[in-house]
Image (cartoon, rainbow, N blue to C red):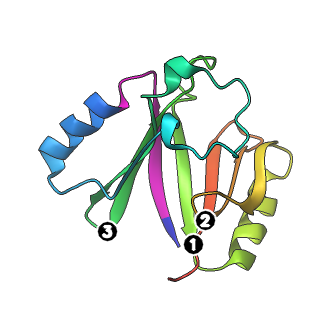
Amino acid sequence: MQLNPYLSFDGNTEEAFNFYKSVFGGEFAFVMRYKDVPADVPMPDKNPADDNRIMHVSLPVGQSMLMASDAPSHLKLNQGNNLQISISVDSKEDADRIFSGLSSGGSVMMPMSDAFWGDYFGMFTDKFGVHWMISYRKAQ
């Protein structure tokens, strides 16, 4: 199991991550923009102005991964809701167990399900206001 910080930005993820890359070195492991999301994936409140915003970027830092995205323009970011904890687990069963346990009494944004990018994935805010993402990627 691995815990990784996941940051949210208001349109400047690319600038921030180019800066982090200049400090930590390395190459981005993954970059996807909102315009790259497959057309058959439902995205409520999709705004064409968000097309060039970063939907997901990841930068390896040591044994961890620093990850981020630009929030869609209809969401307002504030100090406190711009950081999530991402947990990568070793099995679908672990994903379900941890999701169920930590989300108890909280608010589920995305229930655990197979995501279009290949992970088994879910998001929620726990009863203490902490934002979490749980993911499992089957070995390729």
Q: Provide the secondary structure element on which disc 3 rests.
A: loop
Q: Which range of residues does the magenta coloring cover? A: 3-13
Name which of mark 1 and mark 3 comes first in the sequence.
3
Residue type beneath disc 2: Asp
Q: Provide the secondary structure element on which disc 1 rests.
A: loop
Name which of mark 1 and mark 2 comes first in the sequence.
2
In the rendered image, which residue does mark 3 sit on? 63
Checking the image for residue 119, the label placed there is 2
The answer to whether the residues at label 1 and label 2 have Cβ atoms under 8 Å apart is yes
Q: Residue at x 52, y 83 (%)?
A: 139
Query: Where residue 60 sits: x, y (%)?
Result: 29, 59
Checking the image for residue 137, the label placed there is 1
Q: Residue at x 32, y 59 (%)?
A: 29
Dominant SS in magenta: strand
Query: Where residue 65 sits: x, y (%)?
Result: 37, 58
Q: Residue at x 49, y 42 (%)?
A: 36
Label 1 environment density (alpha carbons within 10 Å; few <14, some 14–19, many ≥20)? some
